[in-house]
Amino acid sequence: MRTWFLVTCCLLLLAVSLVSGDTQPSTLPVSPPPPFNDDGLAAAEYNKDDDEQQETKKKDGIFALLHHIEGFASRFVKQDTLSAARSIRQMLETMDDHGIVDLLAHHEPTQILVCIYALSKLQAACQFYERSKTTTSLQEETNNVVDLALLQDLYDCIPFATAAYGWKFNLATSGKWHKGDRQALVKMTQVDPSDIVTVNWEARPNRPAFYIVRDRKRKRIVLAIRGTCSAHDLLTGLGCTTEDYYASNFNERGGGERLRAHSGMLTAARGVALLAEDVIAQELDDHADYSLLLVGHSLGGSAAAVLGTLWAETFRHANVTVYAYGPACVFPESFHDNYKGANIVSVLLDGDPFSCLSLGHVADVSGALDYLCDDTDLRRRVLVHTDEPLKHISSRDLEWCSRTMADIKRGLTLTEKLYPPGQLLFIHKKSKHSKQPDCSVQEVPPSFFQYWKLGPRMFDLTRHAPKVYETSLRKSIIRAKHHTT
């Protein structure tokens, strides 16, 4: 576990380095001491801004280089790829505007690593304390059981999201061989080949791959959007600033509720809508008693959620529903309180690294680390109070950790965070030693995902895999049935 945590810390430090634009050691060469005058004072007063000015020049040089590379690449790269890359460059240039602290410009890498470890221990203790304050913790709570019919429908529909990845992905994750993407789609979703309306397997920047089928069994037109599976999809996901838009598929002068969302997912949703809206409209005209289901995993689920807000009025008669499995953080917290359009349901697995990751989350963590780096005594006390395994930490120490975390949070700059979309269903995986079924589902508020928790498995992508979601949903249904009998 310690080895994994060291690897995780190094990865996080590398990420901070890339975000800050600093790929060189932060320590500067030591200059000789300045001469003194007759009064014993330094003849040339040390300018505290020198380090910051040198860091600024270094960043400006890096971004200038990127600009030249961009100009050269424009001769060979398609315009949509270039546009996505330009958006990412602009986002990196304005990191300070999002409240992200350039840790390497102010602290030594070894000091940052120690602070990452201390903050992870503090976060874990606070989470344990919050969940143990009540008589029943999240994993044991049964009075807020998610509707079994909804769980079953989510489980029945996740193959549509998985099939969007194609036969190669299915072979890699399940070992099942299919002769091409089309056969994989038919086998995994159990739809008749004649009910495949259209497929678009080629992703472009800001326009993920997708397909449309008729689900005659449930009387639905299903639009499934693929998650991240190519460099183009990665460019879409990295466009993680926010953008205002209207909750309709009209232009800025059109009607609709004004919302705010992850700009990359918004652009992806518009790209899919441009190609799919007329097809969907025709299918719903031909099948008047069918509803519309938008489904996807990861990026696909996030784009589907935004698309659901765009189409809620356009296809009002079709009862637009969105099922998002492991989506990214897409909307601010205000969305969950005010939006009354499409029925959006998100399923999030315990430990999924993308359930609480946005620029606002990164800003909070960088601020907390900066706080700990500046206060050596506090960092030492955190490690003392969290030295024991969680279950053996005294209630007094847990209370101290909770108060300390609250003090750190009060000192942070408030930045906008994004959260997973819609109704949030959290799947908690129980201990291997539990006698009960090992997965349970709980509806949680957006604030449940307000902190990016550091830990040895914070970059564990196995907890994000669609097959793991499918298995966890199946086990959750078993547990739900167990409680109803």
Image (spheres, rainbow, N blue to C red):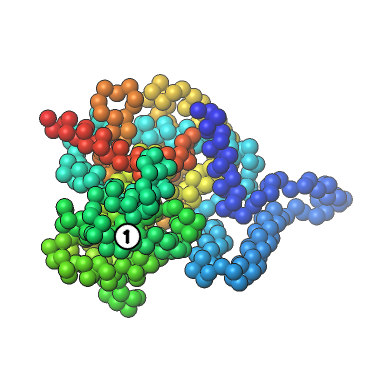
Q: Is residue 202 above or below residue 169?
A: below
Horizontally, residue 376 falls left or right of residue 230, namely right
Q: Residue furthest bottom?
A: 253
Between 71 and 88, the one lying in front of the other is 71
* Residue lying furthest front: 179
Q: Amino acid at mark 1?
A: Tyr
Q: Residue at x 35, y 75 (%)?
A: 252
Q: Where residue 45 sits: x, y (%)?
A: 77, 54
Q: Position of residue 48 (x, y in %)?
A: 69, 53
Quadrant of the rendered structure where residue 403 is? top left
Residue 223 place in picture, x, y as percent: 28, 59
The one of 22 and 79 positioned closer to us in this rendering: 79
Residue in view at x 55 percent, y 51 percent: 101
Would residue 366 be visible to someone looking at this image?
Answer: yes
Residue of label 1:
211
Q: Residues within 10 Å of mark 1 (few under 14, many from 20)?
A: many
Out of 266 and 80, give the one closest to the viewer. 80
Is residue 298 in sight in this rendering? no
Q: Nearer the viewer, residue 37 or 176?
A: 176
